[in-house]
Amino acid sequence: METFDLATLRQFLALARHQNLSDAALELHLSPSALSKGLKRLEQALQTTLFDRQGRNLRLNTDGARLLDRAAALMASADQMRSEFLGTRGSFHCRISGPALLQLNWGRRIASLIGERFPGAQVAFGNEKEDEALSALARGEADLALVTTAALGALDPRHRALNIGLTRFEVAVGANHPLALSASGPRATVTEVLKYPFVVPAQPPFRGLQGGPATDGWRDDQQPRIIRYRSDDLLLVDGLVRAGLALAYLPDYALAELQLLRLDLTDNPFSCTQQVVLVYRPGTASGWLNYVVEAMKSEAVT
């Protein structure tokens, strides 16, 4: 009878993530044929098929879905045991999913925590919409998901959410913009701000901004702006603001990370705030992940 080991289960999890032999083989540094043979051995050992074949692509079937959670739990248990013996000498691969705007601050902070404690670790940052980030976590394609509270909805019972920060949106302005050159510094009334063009996201970055009057949380229904540029590329937004071509309405931490000036609005009756949440699966949490969760919990500002 065929048997399998943890390495085979790791291969299965990679296949479940990618649903493609070539992509999974690339991640694992194996040849597609070697990975295919490993899958065949696993299916023979379990006496079932785990994927439906569609050309070069694979689709997880019912039995494969049954195995997915158990395999993830076994791998997490093995990683937990390994981390207990190796301590900070251990190496692992952390995958953080979530929008780039959240990765900019909280993803970077998580990476810093991991790097300080586990110098042999690697961190991969995704750039997904919040729903996609949570789905990646559920499928085992991510270890952590960064989202806002509006995206939680009916939280997967396997997941746990930790409030890690509250962000307020501010108007970003370049140093050479006319509104930044006044003797009193970068400050203005709303009427003055509305005379200048803005750059806004092509798509709302957070679930709570969908269906609103603007993709970035500004009350365009009450204070209509000149929207000249649309882009989801943070580097491009940063460049437009620095060049004085546009203003941007961004989370306060984004201004700090990008080193943009904050324009003080002296009479704005509206504001946009978002609660940031770290989501993880406690049932498959290894030692390093528990360390990250506890560290983020101690730093949380809610």
Image (tube, rainbow, N blue to C red):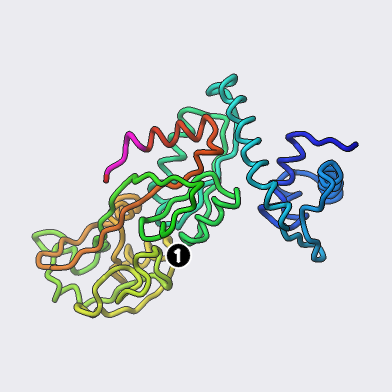
Number of on-image labels: 1
Find disc 1 in the rendering and name its residue.
Answer: 233
Helix, strand or loop: magenta stretch: helix
Does 27 lie within the magenta span? no
Residue 175 appears in the rendering? no
Q: Residue at x 51, y 46 (%)?
A: 158
Q: Position of residue 224 (x, y in %)?
A: 23, 80
Q: Is residue 244 left or right of residue 137?
A: left
Which residue appears at 73% of the width and 58% of the height?
A: 61
Q: Residues within 10 Å of mark 1 (few under 14, many from 20)?
A: few
Horizontal side of 74 relative to 279 (left or right) equals right
Which quarter shows the N terminus? top right
Position in image of residue 267 (x %, y %)? 10, 67
Q: Amino acid at mark 1?
A: Asp
Query: Which range is magenta?
Result: 297-301
Q: Is residue 26 above or below residue 298?
A: below
Q: Residue furthest top?
A: 85
In the rendered structure, the answer to whether residue 70 lies left or right of residue 191 reads right
Reply above or below: 231 against 53: below
Based on the displayed image, in which of its 4 quarters is residue 69 positioned? top right
Q: Position of residue 78 (x, y in %)?
A: 64, 30
Residue 2 seen in this snapshot? yes
Q: Position of residue 113 (x, y in %)?
A: 43, 34
